[in-house]
Image (cartoon, grey):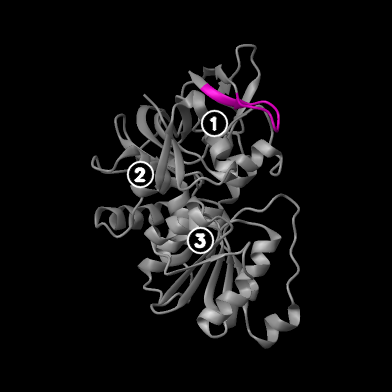
Amino acid sequence: MKAAVLFESNKPMPIVELDQSEPKTGEVRIKMSAAGICASDHHVMTGDNPTPMPIVLGHEGSGVVDAVGPGVMSVKKGDRCVLSFVANCGYCRSCRSGLSNLCDTNRETGTRQYDGTFRIHTSDGTEVHQFAKLGVFAEMIVIPEQACYPIPDDVPMDVAALIGCSVATGVGGVINQPGMRAGMTVAVIGTGGVGLNALQGARLMNASKVIAVDIFDHKLEFAYKFGATHVINSREQDPVAAIQEMTDGGVDFAFDTFGHKATLAQAYNATRKGGTAVLVGIAPEGMDVEIPMVDMVRNQKTLVGSYYGSASPHETFRKLLDFYSQGRIDVGGMVTRKYKLDEVNEAYDALARGEDGRGVIVFD
């Protein structure tokens, strides 16, 4: 099968013919249908997130079960699936504690399958990693069955792909936050794919004000379609001061969906007394932020991280598919660009330029 392979940071990904092993016990082979263009993969491409190479990137995807290995019970050949980039084991402490999005075993095995081995190789036998055990920038992938969540036939595959990452991360990161209640004020810093979905999450929770912050006017204009009631261009004005003025002292919840020390500081400082700042975006490896400790105590603020929607990915998928079928979230409207697999580098160029919405690779 063909796949886009990253051999070296800051170099284009060539399309390479790879050899693929058959699925082992508890594994399935997926024929890819759609793959989203996400910034988390771009962090690997630029070297901000050091990852073993060669690697097939891509973790936001959907496809059809093509074959199943021994012992597979949850899916069968022909099932249409949204793919989870955390294929939880179900047995580790995190899974048993209800935090399957933080599965210990999944993290320990990383870009290898659960038995510690690889399923794809180059023609000369070099082992190739799969990002998040998926690597959806490929025609076919062998993955754990736990990564597959069957979906109804009427859900388009590009929609399903986005539900697998940006929708689950953004909407889930808002609606699954303890303490989130109707009528609260919310700020979302960064209006990429995850940020747009955080806006939708705030709208689902009936937030009274939903403030979008970005550095591009065209992205802020686009944000109105997904629930923003107010917008701030942080190149043109101080977002913290503007948010405090709009909300008489700060928002109840501020979400940093970009992932940087500057944007997290803005999120924290934009919250009111008793407010919560939530870091959703992945920052470059090793980046730290300074938080005023006295302010945190005296104003009883909270700073938390949110990974993959803060809850079980499959449970979040279930909610999102219901919201989508009821017309309560717009997923298809985020897809503004479609590409073929051999255009994957062009797709990431568009992402780096800050173009609206989400790009999606569509497979034949």
Whichever of callouts 3 and 1 sits on the residue coming sooner in the sequence is 3
Q: Secondary structure at mark 3?
A: helix
- Position of 148 relative to 140 (above/below): below
Q: Is residue 287 magenta?
A: no
Residue at left offset 29%, top offset 60%: 328
- Position of 296 relative to 352 (above/below): below
Whichever of callouts 2 and 3 sits on the residue coming sooner in the sequence is 2
Indicate the position of residue 338 as horizontal and vertical percent values: 41, 34
Observer-nearest of 81 and 154: 154
**Which residue position is annotated with label 3?**
310
Given the current orientation, which residue lies at the most extreme bottom position? 298
- Position of 44 relative to 199 (above/below): above
Residue 78 numbered tag: none
Residue 346 numbered tag: 1
The segment highlighted magenta reads 3-13
Residue at left offset 37%, top offset 39%: 158
Q: Nearer the viewer, mark 1 or mark 2?
A: 1
- Amino acid at pointer 1: Glu
- How busy is the neighbourhood of tag 1: few (under 14 within 10 Å), some, or many (20 plus)? few
Dot 3 and dot 1 residues touching (CB under 8 Å)? no
Cα distance in 3D space between marks 2 and 3 = 21 Å
Q: Is residue 98 visible?
A: no
Q: Secondary structure at mark 1?
A: helix
**Which residue position is annotated with label 2?**
159
Cα distance in 3D space between marks 3 and 1 = 32 Å
Observer-nearest of 294 and 20: 294
